[in-house]
């Protein structure tokens, strides 16, 4: 396995940095973040002097580090240089040993073995505990008020009346966010057994929570994070937690199945018909079918226009959405209602609403709404 392959399987080296950074004898439990100075893993210090950042030309496909606290060595390099320096390898004579260490400890394969993406998790001291104990996400104690940036971000995905003011848009967004138990936090705490880890928000990386009050579980949403794998985090269970399910009526003429939380709020603000999302937590529709069947005889799917996406960690195509949509249509007899996405070449409902509101295409929104309401 060459360096390009290793970087592609470790998110540009992110997994390598994070894994070994936490093993440093100088590690004090502080979060490992991108583009922020952290305490150096190479020495005891009180002022952060170590940072990891995207390469200036290769971007996040190859992350580099700088150790500003060691001006004589002028330490900088990629993940392989980082491992070599941390463990005392000579890059000129022992580079293969560096690659072998990373392959074995991060990817779980010997140099002569073939790597199977997703088949191995790096070993850490608390790995057995993580596999046995449930993940707890503490969010409510760290709840903060909505600010202008928060509300304006979500407002763009919600339909508001023509001629609305900025103030009205923010008021409208806050109404829908509160209705769906969403709120911002200054940080959240991930708890696994006795291991507690805090994740703070930053001005350029706010943290939002979609909360499930009945079970005290949550989905963490970080729309501006530079690392795709950090965008969503959840301890939600599909059998017990379905976003917006408490807002559904006992009976209705039509019921729509969406793809995500933002899509659900966008749909509710636009069409006004009952809907809920079908996502990774609720991909198995069988457990909920008896409930929704009793609500309505007319059930439609409004899944994404583009069902497949690339898993950036494994490099594999994730076609879960396509499989679920096919099952809904073929096995359960539900009807597709995503014709407007295909007509406009837009991927999902939230993006459709954003583009139409941005371009002031209220006529398209109204015409499409009438077509949807006429579905039988």
Image (spheres, grey):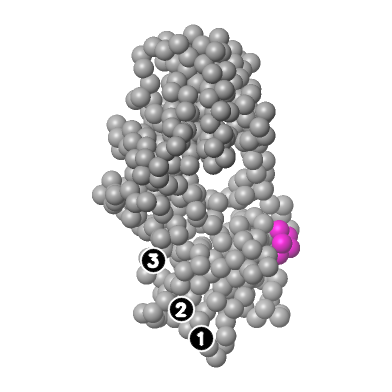
> Residue 195: x, y in percent?
35, 55
Tell me where the magenta segment starts and ends, as one range: 1-5
The residue tagged 3 is 30
First along the sequence among labels 3 and 2: 3
Q: Are marks 3 and 2 in contact (CB under 8 Å)?
A: no
First along the sequence among labels 3 and 1: 3
The secondary structure type at the circle numbered 2 is loop
The secondary structure type at the circle numbered 1 is loop
Q: Is residue 243 left or right of residue 145?
A: right
Extreme residue in the front direction: 163
Extreme residue in the bottom direction: 72
Which residue does the image show at 42% across and 12% down from the upper left? 252
- Residue 282 drawn above or below residue 174: above
Residue 57, quarter of the rendered image: bottom right
- Residue 54 drawn above or below residue 141: below
The residue tagged 2 is 49
Q: Is residue 344 magenta?
A: no
The residue tagged 1 is 70
> Residue 285: x, y in percent?
51, 22
Which residue does the image show at 54% across and 41% down from the upper left? 358
Answer whether residue 360 is visible to the viewer in this image. yes
Which residue does the image show at 53% across and 69% down from the upper left? 52
């Amino acid at each position: 396995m060459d360096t390009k392959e290793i970087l592609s399987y470790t998110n540009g080296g992110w997994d390598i940095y994070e894994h070994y950074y936490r093993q440093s004898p100088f590690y004090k439990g502080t979060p490992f973040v991108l583009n922020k100075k952290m305490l150096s893993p190479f020495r005891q210090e009180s002022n952060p002097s170590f940072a990891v950042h995207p390469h200036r030309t290769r971007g996040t496909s190859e992350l580099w580090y700088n150790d500003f606290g060691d001006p004589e060595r002028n330490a900088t390099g990629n993940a392989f240089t980082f491992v070599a320096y941390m463990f005392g390898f000579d890059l000129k004579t022992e580079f293969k040993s560096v690659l072998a260490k990373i392959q074995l400890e991060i990817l779980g394969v010997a140099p002569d073995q073939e790597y199977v993406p997703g088949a191995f998790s790096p070993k850490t001291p608390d790995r057995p505990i993580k596999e046995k104990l449930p993940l707890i996400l503490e969010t409510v104690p760290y709840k903060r008020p909505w600010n202008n940036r928060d509300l304006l971000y979500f407002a763009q995905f919600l339909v508001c009346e023509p001629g609305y003011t900025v103030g009205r848009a923010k008021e409208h967004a806050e109404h829908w966010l509160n209705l769906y138990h969403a709120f911002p936090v200054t940080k959240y705490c991930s708890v696994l057994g006795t291991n507690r880890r805090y994740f703070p928000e930053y001005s350029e990386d706010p943290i939002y929570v979609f909360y499930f009050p009945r079970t005290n579980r949550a989905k963490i949403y970080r729309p501006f994070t530079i690392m795709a794998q950090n965008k969503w985090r959840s301890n939600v269970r599909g059998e017990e937690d379905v976003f917006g399910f408490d807002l559904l009526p006992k009976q209705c003429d039509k019921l729509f199945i969406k793809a995500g939380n933002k899509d659900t709020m966008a749909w509710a603000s636009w069409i006004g018909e009952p809907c809920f999302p079908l996502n990774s937590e609720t991909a198995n529709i069988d457990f909920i079918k008896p409930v929704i069947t009793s609500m309505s005889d007319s059930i439609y799917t409004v899944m994404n226009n583009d069902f497949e996406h690339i898993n950036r960690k494994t490099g594999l195509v994730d076609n879960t959405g396509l499989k679920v949509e096919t099952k809904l249509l073929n096995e359960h007899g539900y009807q597709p209602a995503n014709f407007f996405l295909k007509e406009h070449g837009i991927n999902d409902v939230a993006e459709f609403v954003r583009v139409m509101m941005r371009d002031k295409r209220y006529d398209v929104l109204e015409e499409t709404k009438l077509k949807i309401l006429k579905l039988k």
